[in-house]
C-alpha cells in the first residue's frame, strides 16, 4: 500500500457543484427513490479531494456512478452523495501498456477505448451498465469475465484526502464480493482508512485503476462488443427503467431460471414488475416507488425460498431511510 500525498490540492477552492435536497430518482437507473440532503459533483479528482477535506468526520457519504445498481429508499439519504460519473472520466495508456482509468468511466467507454488501442479482454465491459468504481466495489462481470481478473492495482481515496495505491492482494475478492483485508490493522494506522463500502459510513472510495490487457486486434474486439450488445438488447428489458440483475446467481444455478420456475415473471407491486423478458430484472413500468421495488424484491425472495429452498441474495445495493429525512 503506497501513500500519495496530494499536497498541491490543499489550498485550491472548490470548483464542483453542491446542491441540496436532490431527488435521487434523477440519479438512479430505476428512476425511483427519495431525496438526498446534499449532492456534490466534483470537477475532477483534485476537486473531490478538496471537498472531502471540508466534511465533518462523521458526515455520511456515499459515492454514486450511473446509479445502475442502486435503490435509494423513499425516505432519502442523510449526508452527502458524490456524483462521480461526469467527473472522474480520465483514461490513458501508460508507458507499460496498461490502461489507467478513473472511477467515473462507463463500461461501454472502457471497452471501446481498449479496442481503439488494439487491446483485448475488455469487450465484456460493454455489457455492464455501470462505471468503473461500482464495478470494482462489487467485482462486476458478465459473460464469464470479471473486472478484478484484469486489475493490476487500484487507486483509492480516503476521507482524509489521502490517495492510496492498493493491489488485488489487499482484498478478498469473490463472486460479486470485494472486501479489504486486515481492516483492523488499517484502522489502527489511520482512523480514516476503513475501507469498505458501508453505504452510510463510507471511508474509502475507488477513484481509479490500472488494468492489464493483452495485445489484440481492434477490429475483432469491436465486433465482439457489437455482438455482446446485441445479445444484451435481445435478452434484457432495456426499454424500461431497471437496475440490471437484481439477484446474485446461486452456486451452479441462475437466479433468472429459479424466478421463472416459480412462476414469478410478471409479478407486480405498484409500478414495479418482474420482467417477462428476463426474470432477474425488475422494471419500473410507470410511477414505481422505491418501496414498491423493495417490496417486490422481498416477495420474490420469499417465493423462491418457499418453493425451492434457495435464498436469493440481492446484487443491487439498497440504501437510505424508511422515513423521510425531513421528518
Image: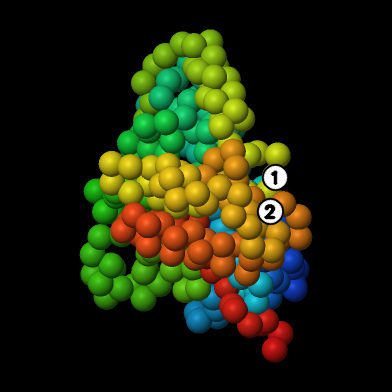
Residue 30 horizontal side relative to residue 95, left or right: right
Task: Describe the element under mark 1 as helix, strand or loop.
Answer: loop
Q: Earlier in the sequence, mark 1 or mark 2?
A: 1
* 229 versus 61 height, above or below: above
Nearer to us in this view, 208 or 286:
286
Q: Can see residue 256?
A: yes
Report which quarter residue 186 is drawn in. bottom left
Specify the label residue 284 is tagged with.
2
Taking the spot 55% from the left edge, 25% from the top edge, the residue there is 231
Q: Quadrant of the N terminus?
A: bottom left
Q: Residue 182, percent across and down? A: 23, 64
Residue occupied by mark 1: 240
Give the image location of residue 169, x and y in percent. 24, 48
- Image location (x, y in percent) of residue 255: 41, 47
- The residue closer to the viewer here, 301 or 159, is 301
**Residue at 55% over, 78% down:** 59
Check disc 1: other Cα within 10 Å, few if <14, some if 14-19, many if 20+. some
Label 1 close to label 2 by CB (< 8 Å): yes
**Among the 4 quarters of the image, the one containing residue 10:** bottom right
Rendering coords of residue 309 (x, y %): 31, 58
Circle 2 packing at 10 Å, graded few (<14), some (14-19), many (20+), is many
Amino acid at each position: 500500500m503506497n501513500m500519495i500525498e496530494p499536497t498541491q490540492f490543499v489550498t485550491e477552492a472548490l470548483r464542483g457543484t453542491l446542491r441540496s435536497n436532490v431527488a435521487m430518482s434523477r440519479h438512479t437507473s430505476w428512476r425511483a427513490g427519495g431525496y438526498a440532503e446534499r449532492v456534490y459533483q466534483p470537477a475532477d479528482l483534485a476537486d473531490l479531494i478538496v471537498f472531502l477535506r471540508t466534511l465533518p468526520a462523521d458526515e455520511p457519504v456515499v459515492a454514486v456512478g450511473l446509479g445502475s445498481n442502486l435503490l435509494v429508499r423513499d425516505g432519502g439519504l442523510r449526508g452527502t452523495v458524490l456524483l462521480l460519473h461526469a467527473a472522474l472520466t480520465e483514461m490513458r495508456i501508460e508507458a507499460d501498456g496498461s490502461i489507467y482509468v478513473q472511477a467515473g468511466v462507463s463500461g461501454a467507454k472502457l471497452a471501446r477505448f481498449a479496442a481503439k488501442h488494439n487491446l483485448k479482454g475488455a469487450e465484456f465491459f460493454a455489457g455492464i451498465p455501470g462505471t468503473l468504481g461500482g464495478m470494482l466495489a462489487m467485482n462486476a462481470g458478465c459473460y464469464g469475465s470479471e473486472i478484478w481478473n484484469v486489475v493490476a492495482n487500484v487507486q483509492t481515496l480516503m476521507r482524509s484526502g489521502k490517495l492510496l495505491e492498493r493491489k488485488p492482494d489487499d482484498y478478498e475478492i469473490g463472486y460479486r464480493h470485494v472486501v479489504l483485508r486486515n481492516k483492523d490493522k488499517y484502522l489502527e494506522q489511520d482512523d480514516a482508512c476503513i475501507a469498505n463500502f458501508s453505504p452510510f459510513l463510507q471511508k474509502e472510495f475507488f477513484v481509479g485503476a490500472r488494468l492489464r490487457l493483452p495485445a489484440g486486434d481492434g477490429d475483432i474486439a469491436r465486433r465482439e462488443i457489437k455482438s455482446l450488445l446485441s445479445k444484451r438488447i435481445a435478452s434484457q428489458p432495456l426499454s424500461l427503467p431497471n437496475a440490471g440483475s437484481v439477484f446474485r446467481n446461486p452456486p451452479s444455478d441462475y437466479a433468472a431460471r429459479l424466478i421463472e420456475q416459480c412462476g414469478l415473471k410478471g409479478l407486480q407491486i405498484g409500478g414495479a414488475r418482474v420482467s417477462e423478458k428476463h426474470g432477474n430484472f425488475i422494471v419500473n413500468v410507470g410511477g414505481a416507488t422505491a418501496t414498491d421495488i423493495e417490496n417486490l424484491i422481498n416477495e420474490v425472495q420469499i417465493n423462491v425460498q418457499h418453493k425451492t429452498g434457495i435464498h436469493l441474495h440481492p446484487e443491487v445495493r439498497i440504501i437510505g431511510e424508511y422515513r423521510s429525512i425531513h421528518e
